[in-house]
């Protein structure tokens, strides 16, 4: 079964992680049958987004199966616009990500900076996709409101850490809100829950590589009580449908 | 003479600020700071080895600057020579447990301490707000070593713990970037002596004058102020 991994990081973490070079990542992709992978720059996420995007572009230029998210920083909207103009027109960049609430940038999902960035993203109609990491259900609620407000943008909730008891009814009808399944220790039936609630077509495979390992999440999908066709959709076809540039 | 033990440069991801090295040079010139100890924010937020290299390169541009090293203990792989990554070109090692989210009672930190002793460095440790007890633990952990420990992030919220530990452990010093009032200097001088207080501003993340003026307004003698503003750190580092 072929896989597209929409959530990966390029760079060295501040944790004991060996997997940082192209060859090791390609070997891991071959091992897990990952055909294409979308990275965001780790340096861009935790430190300097401009430096990170520049480095990532060089990596993407060398490897045909590698794609990228553009990192931006809500505290630097003007500089973020410049990055968007520089990279979003390129075929290898698919949208903005991984954007973060709190944590590394200490900003709410709907901060004025992020809002300006989302407004600017509308200038790039082929790339209106955002992979967002939301800390806590309060920020998930904010993301849901943003998804309603910016209906032209596809919002992907990284790690799918949504409390369906709180938001389940509300998110059912939001057509531009998607979910990516990596993340530590959700309940055993998490994938089934998401599929039953949202439908299979809203769910993407992601691994959070190189922080985490794709095998964990491949196992999670394979172990879930869903049909083979639904598994294929999550592993591959949903991403192919939404990220059209991956067909190139 | 003014020596500033606490400064940074690089890129600041959590707020829009010009924290470039050039900005640091401008602040230095504006306030006639004679000596600045600095490190790259890259080493705190991203990768300490890259950060330390950048620090060493940058300080070559201006002799006023002295390099400060950092190490990120979250990256410890278990390798024997991990701490050898701290180069001997540095005299001060700064740690950021609160920013990086690791506790003082942390096994990699225990392993680091003998290396600091061996390298004959001064240790500077960030004390996070709301992490009461960290200073007490740090004081106990370092009491069997001979290297000086400079605490940063010391303000009214942890004065009590700081003063108490400084009375117990003579190798603990305090940096002043969070001293918001002139009387803080006076209290510390009275209780532990002017020799244990080291001026630091936190530039360019903080305003230099907002730290300097309370110090200047304090009712300390000229000799006490000279020690705090520069002589103490020169003595600790044999400069």
Image (cartoon, helix red, strand yellow):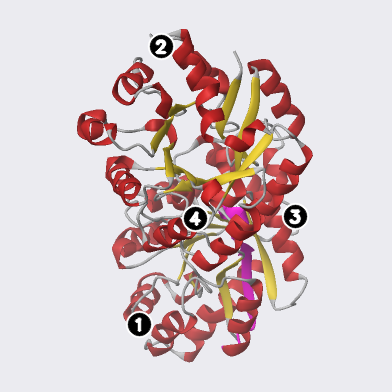
> On screen, A28 above or below B97?
above
On what subunit does the disc labeled 1 rest?
Answer: B
Q: Chain of mark 4?
A: A
Q: Could you confirm whether marks 3 and 1 are on the same chain?
A: yes
Q: Which mark is residue B88?
A: 3
Q: For the N terminus of chain B, which image quadrant?
A: bottom right
Are discs 2 and 4 located on one and the same chain? yes
Mark 2: secondary structure: loop
Q: Is residue B82 visible?
A: yes
Q: Tell which tag, 2 or 4, sits nearer the viewer.
A: 4
Left or right of B131 in this view: A37: right
Element under label 4?
helix
Tell me the magenta residue range.
Answer: B31-45
User: In the rendered image, which residue does mark 1 sit on?
Assistant: B182
Mark earlier in primary sequence (3, 1): 3
> Does the magenta-highlighted stretch encompass residue B34?
yes
> Which quarter of the figure is the C terminus of chain B placed in?
bottom right
Q: Residue at label 4?
A: A121
């Amino acid at each position: 079964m072929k896989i597209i991994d929409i959530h990966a990081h390029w760079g060295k973490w501040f944790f004991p992680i060996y997997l940082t070079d192209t060859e090791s990542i390609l070997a891991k992709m071959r091992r897990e049958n990952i055909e294409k992978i979308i990275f965001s720059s780790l340096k861009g996420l935790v430190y300097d987004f401009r430096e990170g995007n520049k480095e990532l572009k060089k990596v993407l230029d060398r490897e045909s199966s590698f794609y990228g998210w553009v990192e931006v920083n809500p505290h630097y909207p003007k500089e973020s616009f410049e990055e968007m103009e520089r990279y979003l027109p390129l075929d290898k960049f698919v949208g903005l990500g991984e954007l973060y609430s709190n944590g590394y940038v200490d900003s709410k999902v709907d901060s004025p900076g992020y809002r300006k960035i989302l407004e600017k993203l509308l200038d790039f109609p082929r790339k209106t996709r955002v992979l967002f990491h939301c800390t806590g259900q309060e920020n998930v609620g904010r993301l849901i409101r943003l998804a309603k407000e910016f209906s032209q943008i596809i919002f992907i909730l990284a790690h799918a850490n949504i409390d369906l008891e709180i938001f389940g009814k509300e998110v059912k009808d939001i057509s531009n809100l998607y979910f990516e399944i990596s993340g530590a220790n959700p309940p055993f039936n998490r994938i089934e829950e998401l599929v039953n609630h949202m439908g299979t077509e809203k769910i993407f495979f992601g691994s959070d590589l190189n922080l985490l390992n794709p095998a964990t999440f491949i196992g999670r999908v394979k172990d879930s009580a869903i049909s083979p066709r639904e598994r294929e959709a999550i592993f591959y076809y949903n991403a192919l449908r939404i990220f059209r540039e991956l067909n190139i | 003479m003014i020596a500033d033990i606490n400064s940074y440069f690089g890129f600041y991801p959590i707020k829009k600020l010009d924290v470039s090295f050039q900005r640091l040079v401008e602040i230095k010139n504006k306030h006639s700071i004679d000596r600045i100890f600095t490190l790259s924010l890259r080493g705190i937020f991203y990768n300490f080895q890259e950060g330390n290299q950048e620090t060493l390169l940058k300080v070559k541009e201006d002799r006023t600057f002295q390099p400060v090293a950092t190490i990120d203990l979250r990256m410890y792989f278990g390798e024997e020579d991990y701490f050898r990554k701290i180069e001997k070109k540095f005299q001060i090692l700064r740690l950021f447990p609160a920013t990086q989210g690791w506790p003082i009672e942390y096994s990699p930190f225990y392993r680091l301490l003998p290396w600091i002793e061996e390298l004959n460095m001064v240790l500077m440790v960030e004390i996070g707000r709301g992490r009461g007890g960290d200073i007490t633990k740090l004081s106990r952990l370092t009491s069997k070593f001979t290297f000086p420990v400079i605490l940063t992030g010391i303000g009214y919220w942890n004065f009590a713990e700081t003063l108490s530990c400084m009375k117990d452990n003579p190798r603990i010093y305090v940096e002043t970037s969070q001293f918001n009032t002139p009387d803080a200097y006076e209290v510390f001088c009275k209780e532990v002596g002017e020799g244990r207080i080291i001026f630091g501003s936190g530039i360019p993340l903080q305003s230099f004058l907002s730290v300097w003026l309370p110090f200047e307004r304090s009712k300390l003698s000229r000799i006490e102020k000279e020690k705090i503003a520069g002589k103490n750190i020169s003595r600790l580092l044999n400069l």
